[in-house]
Amino acid sequence: MNDNENIKFDCSRGCTVSVTPEGETVCTYRRGCCKLEDYDWLGNVPQEQYADIFEVRFKNTRKGFYRNGSGQSIKMGDLVIVEAQNGHDLGIVTLEGAVVGRQLRCKGVDPETAELRRIYRKAKAFDIDKWQEAISREQDTMIRARQIAAELGLEMKIGDVEFQGDGTKAIFYYIADGRVDFRQLIKVFAEEFRIRIEMKQIGARQEAGLIGGLGVCGRELCCANYITSFKSISTGAARVQDLSLNPQKLAGQCGKLKCCLNYEVATYMDAQAGLPKVNGPLEFEDGLAYLVKTDILRQIMYFSYDKGSLVDIYPLDPDEVREVQRMNREGIKPESLKLEPEPNVPEFVSAVGDDSISRFDSQLRSRKKKKNRNRNKGNGSR
């Protein structure tokens, strides 16, 4: 059997699982699989202040900071047994050293006052076997939990189930629009699965981060890649960027407005600050000119004599628009919009546009003509 056929990729936890010929289960940390992965760009910087604090990752986007109280030498990629609220859990060390201090400040955690849970020790073979046995129950447990919730008539969706490393507790991640009465549900779950139950509500964006996937841009979903705190997104962000208010184009895989709508809002708002407000048409001697289109980043405003038409449009820069507005307030009408010079703006050239598929057509035609001419001369000499 090929060695690769014996390897199972567990992308929800960022590791590979394989079984040796002796029957031992081996788990190896695989950074490329981790959701919300942090790059250790301070890996070569020695720092003793955070030498005993590590970031430990569990399933999907759940991770936390733990203090090494075992006395063992722990490094990134080690599987460790950590303290849990009840019992113990098993996770993978994903960050160590100086970058941990940066992450603590980013999360607002003060290591001097915060009560960080402990790392008991490195995981042993029987710990890993127990962990893998618990993981194998997650899919069946989730399917059965959904059936039970439907039988009880609860308006909720169970998106994922995560078992604790010792197999004594499970976290049920669910989505619900309103309040859900869990009293009967938890009682049925406890009798069905014989474990401790924790219900954790998440939003649609958090569910997309747990599941992962690719966006319409072709890249990994931002919620699964790096976003840890979700800010509110409104259609106002699309209006500022002059985007079409089409729900199908503005919605992401979660069914909510795309997180990337907020990325360039500040840039567009700064650019809009330099544009004059046009509340009515500009008055010219040959008619009224209406604002029909605005290129915010290039600072060009397009006007047309036909309101709502994009056929014959004339560009003006913001200074020209302000000048025409000033003249109109003074009762002066410029001669015509058609006589205004083209605005001088930088053109952005794409490398893709340079490589036109017809760029060799003229050369090919000249070669064909030359070839035919030589052929005709040869036929005439005979």
Image: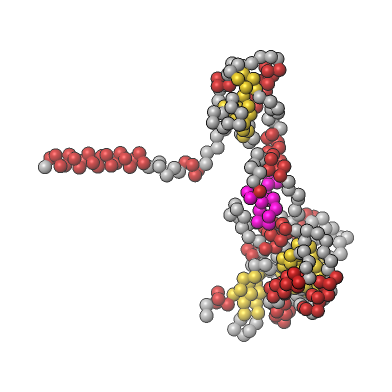
Q: Which residue is painted at 49% across and 42% down in the image?
A: 353
Identity of the residue drawn at 70% across and 15% down: 330
Q: Say whether residue 158 is visible.
A: yes
Q: Residue 30, located in which quarter of the rendered image? A: bottom right
* Quadrant placement of the C terminus: top left
11 is within the stretch colored magenta: no
Q: Nearer the viewer, residue 135 or 172?
A: 172
Determine which quarter of the picture holds residue 169.
bottom right
Q: Residue furthest left?
A: 382
299 above or below 232? above
Residue at the extreme bottom of the image, as rendered: 22
Q: Percent position (x, y) of residue 288?
A: 62, 22
Using the image as rendered, state which of residue 237 and residue 122 is in the foreground. 237
- How many labels, in total? 0
Q: Quadrant of residue 238?
A: top right
* Residue 210 or residue 330, whichever sits in front: 330
Above or below, 109 against 140 in this view is above
Q: Is residue 256 magenta?
A: yes
Residue reaching furthest top? 331
Is residue 72 in view from this perspective?
no
Identify the residue at horizontal 72%, vertical 65% (top origin).
159
Which segment did they paint magenta?
Answer: 248-263
Q: Is residue 336 above or below residue 314?
A: above
* x then y, percent, for residue 351: 50, 43
Q: Is residue 252 above or below residue 91?
A: above
Drawn side of residue 95 relative to residue 292, left or right: right
Give the color scheme: rainbow, by chain, secondary structure or one colour.
Answer: secondary structure
